[in-house]
Amino acid sequence: MCLDAETVWARNIIGCRATGDPVGITNFTFVSPVKGFISTGLVNVPLVWVEDGFPFYKYTPDCDTTAGGKQWCDPSKCASTSASGTTCAQLIAQYPNDMWSRPTVFNKEKWRNNVIPCPWAPISNWRKPWWPDTTYTLKRIVLADGSPHPVFWNEWLEHTKAADGTAGGKMLQSYMSDHWCNRIKAAGSVFDLLGGPPHDCP
């Protein structure tokens, strides 16, 4: 896993995931050629509380919808920023298997029971999710043979451009160890929030 090191959200997600078993399995279950489901431990992580898991839906030829319906589509993220003048519909027609919608929906019931106030929101927003429901567009950036995607690899390089303009030069975060205890120690305060180690660490 690699995430943009410059965002607090990315650092928190890395910390939460660090407490999970490094050799644990994340299931990507396809229920049809156009729909699937990703298991996640974030269902029970305090102050995250994802609803059930992560569904994902294939973009349809009508670029304003996915196999999951219009509510899970963000066509502004479908069109490529690296292929000027190319529409979302054109990209779906050319690369029909390379774009999927992946919504994140938070468990409103668990959030209603939360008594910790949001530090950046007014009191009126207590007991509501600190994070908005969000729809991500997953794009294939590397093909099965290891070669870069004709469109989306260049988009990834542009997205990770460093401050000096170097394509793909932005600092990212990744795990430095597959050792569970080392990951837990590196998680710091996130580890404390989750209530202790899942197994004995020296």
Image (tube, helix red, strand yellow):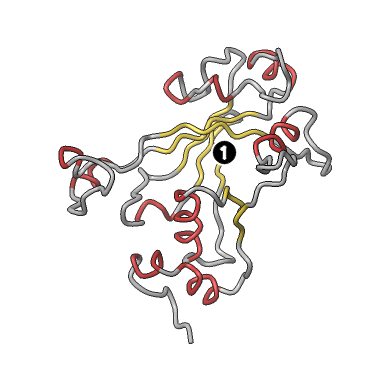
Tag 1: amino acid: Phe
Which quadrant would residue 154 be assigned to in this image?
Answer: top right
Q: Nearer the viewer, residue 146 or 8?
A: 8
Please give the name of the residue rendered at 74% of the width and 39% of the height, measured from the top-left corner.
167
Q: Position of residue 117 (x, y in %)?
A: 21, 50
Which quadrant would residue 142 be assigned to in this image?
Answer: top right
- When the figure is inspected, residue 176 is found, relative to residue 89, above or below; the finding is below
Q: Position of residue 3 (x, y in %)?
A: 58, 49
Please give the name of the residue rendered at 33% of the width and 70% of the height, measured from the top-left corner.
195
Please give the name of the residue rendered at 45% of the width and 18% of the height, measured from the top-left corner.
70
Please give the name of the residue rendered at 42% of the width and 22% of the height, measured from the top-left corner.
71
Which quadrant would residue 1 be assigned to in this image?
Answer: bottom right
- When the figure is inspected, residue 83 is found, relative to residue 186, above or below; the finding is above
- Element under disc 1: strand
**Going by the image, does 93 lie left or right of 199?**
right
Q: Which residue is disc 1 drawn over?
A: 30
Q: Position of residue 146 (x, y in %)?
A: 82, 44
